[in-house]
Amino acid sequence: MPRIIDIIAAIVNRIEPLRLMAVKAGISEYAEACPPRPYSHSMHANYVTWTGLVERKFSGRHLPPATGAKAPAEPDLDRLAALFERDEFIPSHDTSLMFPIFAQWFVDGFLRTKWEDPNEPRKFRENESNQEIDLNQLYGSSETQTLMLRDLGNGGRLKSRIVDGEEWPVLLFEEREDGIHLRDEFAKTDDRPGLYTDDNLHRIFSRWTDEQLKTAWATGLEFGSATLGQSAMNALFLREHNRVAGVIAKAHPDWEDDQVFETTRNVMIVLLLNIVLGDYIPHIATKRLNLAVPPGWAEEQPWYRTNRMAVEFALLYRWHDLIPDEFDSGDGVKPATALTRPNGWLEGVGLGDALLGATRTRAGRIGLFNTASFLNMKGGADVKRLSIEMGRSTHLASYNEYRKLYSLKPIKSFFELTKDKQSAAELQDLYGSIDKLEWFVGIFAEHYEKPQMMGDLLRIMVAHDAFTQAFTNPLLAKSVFGPATFSEEGLNVIKQTQTLADLITRNTTAKDKRKLTMRHQG
């Protein structure tokens, strides 16, 4: 049965003036929840510097470093990690596995904290992305990477291969007599860097078996084959790129290869933005409104500023609680560990069936006591412990200080925070005072009711950064958005794309949009 909120949203979506009024008001509420960029502080130094204000390789920060008496407490990490450990899977209200596999792939394109030696005292300072939503998952972050991934001279297409009638990215490695090696086209030479840096190659692939290396793909990011989200979304968007390039090339036979490619890339970035605003963010907000607004509207808003990714944004997306213990692969139930390095089975099952399986699988509930053991294991992925350590290393302010920044009332007790006596007592024992609670722990300890999928502070911070980063994309500027940028054919594709299901039904064997949602079909 449809919920009242969905019925109301459907009515509002059909009345364009009412939809625009509601959407603009909602976006502005979140976008103006805290002061606009530029951030006064960045990861360049613990104080304001000119370099920190203008050099975008340094991640920003919403609040200045908290030190001394203002710093939150730092209780024992083993005890804190135990607060996140799952004893029994806690399902989400209505979220499918499709949501987290898209979310991870989406945010990993711009939240790229530079990997550094763990013993480096000033680690986590830099961001390897272009600080834009630019689909570098597909195209890479540099012109050199893009050229390596393009099928040059072939109608603006990206390199791909066909396996049993399905299109997939090309392989990254090849087997030779002396072992597994990077394919020559992606390896470093005297004249150019490789597709990935040596550090990133080692960081991602050093623990892969030879059989796993044989299945790794060449994608824009070095971890493009590391999880089901990365692999499935990269394959899907690759197919759509090549499909759209074919449409544009056919309509403009006089265009050179570069123009077809660049126009297609412009279209693809806006398709991603449409999906984020029409499918992804509405699910987080539990509102089913179409968030599309006329190009140029954001330019008139006080929060329309140059993009800068914040260290808090990189941390708040650690939603590993969403990963279940097992999932429908499209070819039977698999343990969640099969979500990592999945290309071998994914190519066998097929992309359409795998994505249908994801939408049939219920995701976990965001919060304490719900991170799968293989993700929370000390010495293994250890995702929550490492996230807490990152927050401490960057001297993040306390949970209540962030509530104040976003105009929320400070929480007065741990029970008010969690509404659960057991977890409140454990947090009280660990931190002593609610004002000493670390922000990262606090956003996952927040209580929330159905149909919400996260607590108030986490939701507002997600929406604020998402809206102010997405709507400031240069392709949405009034002076840019038009046929000269996208072609008439590209504009038509943009108009036809509002949800992830639109891409899936165009590029896989799965054709029923009703079954291909971020909302669990159960």
Image (cartoon, rainbow, N blue to C red):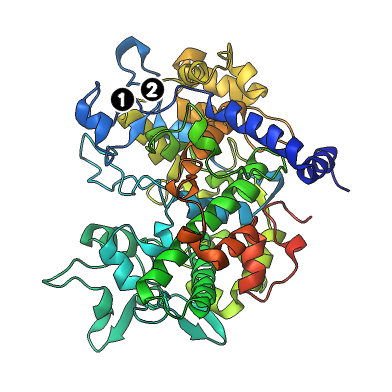
> In the rendered image, which quarter is residue 321 located in?
top right
Vertical placement of residue 42 versus 162, above or below: above
Distance between the alpha carbons at the discs numbered 2 and 1? 7 Å
Q: Which mark is residue 481?
A: none
Q: What residue sits right under mark 1 in the picture?
A: 41
Vertical placement of residue 341 versus 434, above or below: below
Q: Which residue is more in the foreground, 125 or 388?
A: 125
Residue at position x 44%, y 57% from top?
135
Q: What residue sits right under mark 2 in the picture?
A: 63
- Is the C-beta separation of discs 2 and 1 under 8 Å? yes
Q: Position of residue 30 (x, y in %)?
A: 57, 29
Q: Which residue is more in the foreground, 314 or 473?
A: 473
Q: How many marks?
A: 2
Vertical placement of residue 182 versus 163, above or below: above
Residue at position x 44%, y 63% from top?
265
Amino acid at dot 1: His
Q: Position of residue 451 (x, y in %)?
A: 74, 37
Q: Which residue is more in the foreground, 138 or 401?
A: 138
Vertical placement of residue 318 versus 121, above or below: below
Amino acid at dot 2: Leu
Q: Secondary structure at mark 2?
A: loop
Mark 1 Cα within 10 Å, few/some/many (few <14, many 20+)? many
